[in-house]
Amino acid sequence: MRYPEIWRRENLTEIPATFVGIINDCIVANKAVVIVKGLDEWPNEYQRQYGTIDLYWIVRDGGLMLLLSQLLLTKESFESCKIQVFCIAEEDSDAEALKADVKKFLYDLRMQAEVIVITMKSWDGPTEGGRQQDESLEAYTSAQHRIAGYLTEMKSTAQKEGTPLMADKKPVVVNEQQVEKFLYTMLKLNSTILSHSRMAAIVLISLPPPPINHPAYFYMEYMDLLVENVPRLLIVRGYRRDVVTLFT
């Protein structure tokens, strides 16, 4: 489906709940999800692309992103592109071992791609000094303010009506530290994509599943921060079944 970039418009208040509902339905039904951002800027068959197809492989998805990248190469517009696979690893993990594993996996599948491992510090609370360089900092701060305003409204309504916190007609649980963690993670992923894939013809990234009990509005804020300034993006969730195997 298409990423709803217009969801903030006043008359489209149902979009967050609908969007999250579709993703959750697909997860429950064990269906794959592919969300396209930048459909209006997608090249036609005569607009040849010469950059890279960049995959940000965060979770095991049965190889759906790899399969999609290979299918893109069969199209005239993308056939001159090269594939780069970025593996996101935590800072204390063995990056070289991970890189060797992924390279062997791709070699066994006869897939040609450059493998790049990016180590990312796991979240241990905000550190202002490390953020000043981030191009997406303004979007991050704006998302924080909007979420805080939305949360204040929710609390006010719950207090007036004597009900638990409600969003989208359902009770929700808001752990403010967890919300901050999601925002910070999206900020780091977005900054990483902008650092390494600014010239990419297309970027593919794993779809973060909607956190349980978070308002749909919050999830849209997380996703907006993830896709900020990335013009052409495929956000992919496989269905945990291998679609790329040694026998493909």
Image: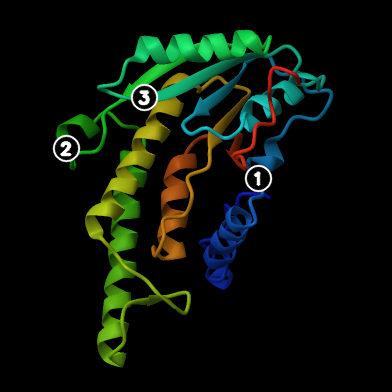
In the visual, does 52 lie left or right of 56?
right
**Crowd around label 2: few <14 · some 14–19 · many ≥20 (10 Å):** few
Upstream in sequence: badge 1 or badge 3: 1
Residue beneath disc 1: 32
Q: Please state which of residues 140 and 120 is positioned toward the viewer in this rendering.
A: 120
Q: What x and y, as percent, mark residue 165?
A: 32, 77
In the figure, 185 relative to 242: above or below?
below
164 to 81, vertically: above or below: below
Which amino acid lies under the numbered mark 3 shown in the image of this protein? Answer: Ala
Q: Residue furthest bottom?
A: 161
In screen coordinates, is 172 left or right of 231? left
Q: Which residue is mark 3?
A: 89
Residue furthest out toward the front: 247
SS state under label 3 = strand
Image height check: is 81 above or below 135?
above
Report whether residue 114 is seen.
no
* Label 1–label 3 contact, CB within 8 A: no
Give the foreground label among 3 and 2. Answer: 3
Report the residue at 33% width, 47% height from top: 183
The reply to whether dot 3 and dot 2 touch (C-beta < 8 Å) is: no
- Disc 3 to disc 2, how far (Cα)? 22 Å
**Which residue bears the numbered disc 2?**
128
Q: CA distance from mark 1 to mark 3?
A: 24 Å
Q: Label 1 vs label 2: CA separation?
A: 37 Å
Disc 2 marks a residue whose amino acid type is Glu
Q: Amino acid at mark 1?
A: Ala
Q: Say whether disc 3 or disc 2 marks the residue closer to the N-terminus.
A: 3
Q: Residue 227: x, y in percent? A: 49, 41
Which numbered disc, 1 or 2, marks the residue that appears first in the sequence?
Answer: 1
Q: Position of residue 120 (x, y in %)?
A: 31, 26
SS label for mark 1: loop
Of circles 1 and 2, which is in front?
1
